[in-house]
Amino acid sequence: MYDSFLLLKNKFESIKNKGWIKSLRRGSTGVGYTFESLLGKDEDSYSLPDFNGIEIKTHRKNSNSYITLFNYNPIGACSYELKRIFNCYGYRSTKYPNSKVLHANVYC
């Protein structure tokens, strides 16, 4: 995995050194699509990591939108622990009154 990080870092530096690059697509997906294209990655709709086992996330400068790293899936081997956390800490949704939600923000 370390080799994959080094490869991505080197490719990132190479792209960064090109300076400003016009987006290859309009709209909210343009930044990600452009970056992945410059990495040599073909567009796909798979939920697998984007680059040698690494999930790539891009973000526009000065954007206030969140980057979603993962979502809760109520079906699966670890669902019992997620359900416990959700039941303990979840709260009623203002948008969907019959449902509970749980949001957590991580800043780094």
Image: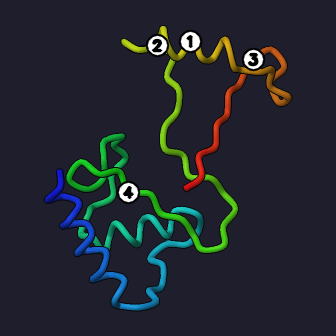
Distance from Cα at disc 2 to Cα at disc 1: 6 Å
Q: Return the residue nearer the eye: 74 or 27.
A: 74
The residue labelled by disc 1 is: 83
Q: Quadrant of residue 102?
A: top right
Label 4 Cα neighbours within 10 Å, binned few <14 / some 14-19 / many ≥20: few
Which tag, 2 or 3, sits closer to the chain's start?
2
Mark 4 or 1, closer to the camera:
1
Please state which amino acid type lies under the numbered disc 3.
Ser
Which tag, 1 or 3, sits closer to the chain's start?
1
The residue labelled by disc 2 is: 79
Residue 80 position in % (x across, y down):
48, 8
Which tag, 4 or 2, sits closer to the chain's start?
4
Label 1 Cα neighbours within 10 Å, binned few <14 / some 14-19 / many ≥20: some
The residue labelled by disc 3 is: 99
In the shown orientation, is residue 14 left or right of residue 101? left
Q: Could you tell me which secondary element the residue under label 4 belongs to?
A: loop
Please state which amino acid type lies under the numbered disc 2.
Ser
The residue labelled by disc 4 is: 56
Which tag, 3 or 4, sits closer to the chain's start?
4
